[in-house]
Amino acid sequence: MLEKFSKNIAKYCFGFFIFLYAAANILVTVRQYNVGENIANYYFGISFLHIIIVGILLLLIAFVLRQQKIKINNKYLLGTFIFACIIVGLYWIFSNYPYLVEVDDAYNCYRAATLVGQGDYGPLGYKSYINTYPHNLSLVSYFMIYTRLFGENATTAIRLVNLIFVLIAYISLYKITDELFHNDKINTVLIILMFLSMQLVFYAFFVYGNVISYSSALLSIYFLIRYLKTEKWQYLLIAGFAIVFSIAIKNNSLIILIAEIIYVFIHMVSHKKWMLSLFIILTIFGEIVTTNGITAFWANRSGNNYDNALPKICWIAYGLNYDERHPGGYMNEFEVYHHDNGFVAEYTATRAKEFINGVLTAFKERPWLIPRFYAQKFLVSFANPEYETFAQYRELPQSPFNESVISGNINDALNQIWDAASTVIAIGLLAYIIKRFKKITLLELMGGVIVFGGFLFHMFWEVKAIYTYQYFMYLLPYAAYGLVLLFGKKKDEGEAA
């Protein structure tokens, strides 16, 4: 009874998201035109070139699915994709500047790690970046390992490890799809979609926690699915460790932990596996101890108090930032106010509440602003084909070719391909939800629950396309399944686990 009820709730919520996503990615074009400020432009209308590219991609997928004489070995195809990721990633890492530009979160965390590793706790002290954002202490601890081991080559080492995590993410995604659907055709289309949307490879250059966190979360989901199918405890333990590590590196993955707890709870009640309550408790406890324990450790070492960090309500205020250039995005007003007023969290929280009340008053007086604002916020986060891939670049690369990749003709071509891929994925998602709606199983909806949770969270929290990219990855298996339902033969459709 609980599984059936949960499945119905999940499939209707996911279906609602898919129709929003499909409308955004089919009917609207989004372009990021200022990579330094994460500013995007969006407008209705589809170019003729876009239609042609989408048509070619759909014909290619249909041809692959309909040709029975062509036997595709998915292991070789996946290996080819992994090899392509390695080549692109290595080229991008070694052909661009090895150091970090002195701005933003990545540099601040890396600088703190370097100095703390040398015994200088100044970057953890009063009026520091870390004092404002102590949740990044886990990332500082992680970076410190590299700065101690590799010295001046630490950024390159971090990027190379990031590339390894990129490969883990794609392999995990493939394995998740295989576990859920057991269908070679779906796996083939999935790899084609991965070829058409390789933004994550470029994120390997980003010396921050996104790639590691997203990859660890995908790995956790894979092992949780393995547990739910086999009930072998070792899979559950790996899933727990992976998601706690993911959250420690980047706390956005809390959404995924919530989804995992929901699934474990449903399995526990439905199958009367009451010992699973111990896993739920230990995982939550492990996450709290890991994040708070690291903060307490560095507070003790540095003699600093992190009780007056920037209040969480500020991120809700960011999420209501009605800046048409980047609605729902970051603004430094509260950080500046926090610094100027002695890091008193209560003062900053009051300022954030005043801002939120002002926006809500404007919405009450002009209610037509509400759908407009949230539509724009959704577009720049879920319909940006670049997903802020190059937003971390603040200086021109070392060659005209790399400059073109970031902001020139090659960038335009990449955007055309990624935008067309987004449309193809949207078509596949629509086909999946329409043609398979009555047969959907609760287990196969796990990715959908994660996506819907991320969508709800970022509709009231600060949003960036780089944050929502991890949810985009969970959509690929469903899109692949939908395209098989749309273009494959009857025997290709298979059944989900």
Image (spheres, rainbow, N blue to C red):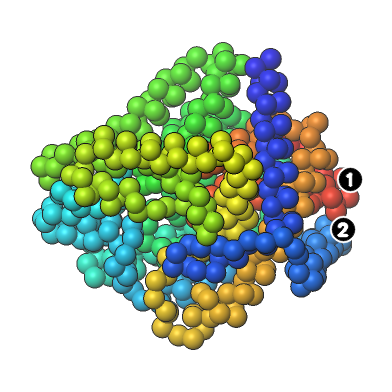
For the N terminus, the image quarter is top right
Q: Amino acid at mark 2?
A: Arg
Residue located beneath label 1 in the image: 490
Task: Count all numbered tags in the image, as a single digit.
Answer: 2
Q: Earlier in the sequence, mark 2 or mark 1?
A: 2
Rate crowding at label 1 as few (under 14), some (14 to 19) or many (20 or more) other CA atoms within 10 Å: few
Expressed as whole percent of the image width and height from the top left, the position of residue 464 reads 49, 53
For the C terminus, the image quarter is top right
Does the image show residue 52?
yes
The image quadrant that residue 43 belongs to is bottom right
The residue shown at (39%, 71%) is 394
Residue located beneath label 2 in the image: 66
Q: Amino acid at mark 1?
A: Lys
199 relative to 59 in the view: left or right:
left
Does the image show residue 456?
no
Identify the residue at the far bottom of this view.
400
Identify the residue at the far front of this view.
365
The residue shown at (22%, 56%) is 113
Most foreground residue, 201 or 85: 201
| Label 2 residue SS | helix
33 relative to 423 in the view: left or right:
left
The residue shown at (42%, 79%) is 396
Rate crowding at label 2 as few (under 14), some (14 to 19) or many (20 or more) other CA atoms within 10 Å: some
Against 385, residue 427 (above or below) is above
Residue contact at pointers 2 and 1, CB within 8 angstroms:
no
| Label 1 residue SS | helix
